[in-house]
């Protein structure tokens, strides 16, 4: 019988320490496994020592691992057998440093090369190598860097960007915000107005209905039937809105919509505060262009117009209603003005029944804090 090269003889204190490591489970799994190897390999074990092959079979490990633990225990002691071997040489420095990440981020925020509409992961990786930031770089690494910085160079978002320190913008913004902050007055309601162009499209081929595991399928070809304009009026505090479809968006259409608002929908209101964008057709002059002077003056006297600032259409609550209407009703092909009017009428009736209003929270005080950069620098 061959004699073992490395014998494990545990003292009573060492046995208790190893048993505690195995029973508590608060130590690293690697140390627990090595403690089990030493306990089963102990020559002083009451139940009898186990062969290396038996220990390896019980722990589902290789016999070489059992042999290695025996060797470390015999040569360096119990603590060395339980702990991971310390690295004698310093680890290799990371390839992706903070400096490289900063350069990649700066590169992604710069203009893309000529002939490219945007930066891609592969384009950024190749450019970093070309600029000698690093010898080689994968696009997966670039992806991790951009995600870490929450950067998305593949996305573009349309946004109203006002000029810096613009007194005209601030004056119109605070005027609209003060109107929104006023309490409800039945004799002078606040009405927001906006309009939206819409393209009429007809199906060339009948869509295939939805089936289990298959969505509705429509042909990419369609027939253009012209365009029209959608006018919307809304009273946010009441939860009322009215939608009208017209062939065009001219002074005549706007004037007719305003007369219907005053004479049909709010005939008893002495005055209406009308909030809208500052377009060329949105003026009292359009009333005189469309009607006789007496009618135009009568309508103008009942209007108190408040314009949203240029590049500040987000201040118009009617845009919120337009966004909801687009998502809920217009996400499809509609071939004619008649059908569009019917669909919008049904949407308007349904939304008015639930009296869904808009709870506007942004105030003048908030604007002076969050949009401070837009205010001109005041000097005493």
Image: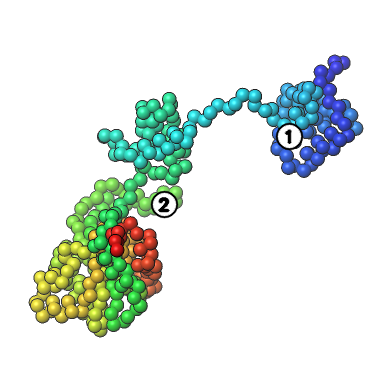
Q: Quadrant of the N terminus?
A: top right
Q: For the residue carrying disc 2, how many other residues have a C-alpha within 10 Å: few (<14), some (14-19), or many (20+)? A: few
Instruction: From the viewer's perspective, tell me whether residue 252 is left or right of residue 5.
Output: left
What is the number of callouts on the image?
2
**Disc 2, disc 1: CB below 8 Å?**
no
Q: For the residue carrying disc 1, how many other residues have a C-alpha within 10 Å: few (<14), some (14-19), or many (20+)? A: some
Q: Residue at x 20, y 71 (%)?
A: 257
| Farthest residue, direction right | 46
Pick the front one: 223 or 264 = 264
- Rendering coords of residue 15 (x, y %): 85, 34
Comparing labels 2 and 1, the label whose residue is closer to the camera: 1
The residue that mark 1 highlights is: 31
Q: Residue at x 73, y 25 (%)?
A: 65
Residue 337, quarter of the rendered image: bottom left
Q: Residue at x 89, y 29 (%)?
A: 44
Pick the front one: 172 or 1 = 172
Q: Is residue 337 above or below residue 23?
A: below
Q: Is residue 309 above or below residue 98?
A: below
State how far apart marks 2 and 1 are (Cα). Answer: 57 Å
Query: From this viewpoint, is residue 366 visible?
Result: yes
Circle 1: element type = helix
- Rendering coords of residue 143 (x, y %): 44, 38
| Mark found first going from the N terminus, 2 or 1 | 1
Query: From this viewpoint, is residue 319 visible?
Result: no
Residue 344, quarter of the rendered image: bottom left
Q: Residue at x 32, y 71 (%)?
A: 178
- Rendering coords of residue 109 (x, y %): 35, 41
Q: Is residue 366 above or below residue 100?
A: below
The residue that mark 2 highlights is: 211
């Amino acid at each position: 019988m061959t004699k073992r090269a490395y014998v494990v003889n545990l003292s009573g204190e060492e046995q208790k320490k190893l048993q505690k490591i195995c029973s508590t489970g608060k130590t690293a799994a690697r140390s627990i496994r090595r403690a089990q190897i030493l306990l089963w390999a102990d020559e002083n074990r009451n139940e009898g020592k186990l062969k290396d092959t038996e220990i390896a079979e019980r722990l589902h490990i290789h016999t070489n691992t059992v042999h290695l633990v025996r060797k470390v225990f015999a040569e360096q002691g119990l603590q060395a057998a339980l702990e991971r071997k310390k690295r004698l040489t310093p680890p290799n420095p990371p390839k992706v440093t903070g400096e490289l990440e900063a350069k990649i981020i700066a590169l992604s925020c710069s203009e893309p090369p000529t002939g490219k509409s945007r930066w891609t992961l592969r384009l950024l990786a190749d450019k970093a190598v070309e600029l000698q930031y690093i010898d080689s770089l994968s696009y997966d690494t670039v992806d991790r860097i951009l995600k870490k910085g929450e950067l998305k160079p593949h996305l573009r978002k349309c946004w109203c960007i006002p000029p810096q320190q613009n007194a005209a913008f601030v004056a119109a913004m605070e005027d609209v915000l003060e109107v929104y902050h006023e309490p409800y007055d039945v004799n002078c309601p606040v009405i927001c107005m906006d309009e939206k162009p819409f393209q009429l499209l007809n199906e060339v081929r009948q869509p295939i209905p939805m089936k289990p595991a298959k969505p509705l399928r429509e042909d990419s070809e369609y027939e253009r039937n012209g365009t029209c304009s959608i006018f919307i009026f809304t009273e946010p505090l009441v939860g009322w809105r009215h939608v009208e479809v017209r062939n065009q968006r001219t002074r005549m259409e706007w004037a007719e919509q305003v007369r219907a608002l005053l004479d049909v929908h709010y005939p008893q209101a002495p005055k209406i505060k009308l909030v809208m964008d500052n377009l060329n057709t949105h003026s009292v002059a359009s009333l005189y262009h469309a009607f006789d002077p007496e009618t135009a003056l009568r309508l103008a006297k009942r209007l108190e117009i408040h314009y949203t600032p240029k590049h500040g259409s987000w201040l118009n609550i009617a845009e919120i209603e337009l966004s909801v209407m687009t998502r809920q009703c217009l996400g499809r092909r509609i071939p004619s003005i008649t059908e569009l009017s019917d669909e919008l009428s049904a949407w308007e009736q349904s939304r008015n029944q639930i009296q869904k209003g808009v709870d506007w929270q942004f105030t003048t005080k908030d604007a002076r804090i969050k949009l401070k950069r837009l205010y001109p620098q005041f000097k005493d």
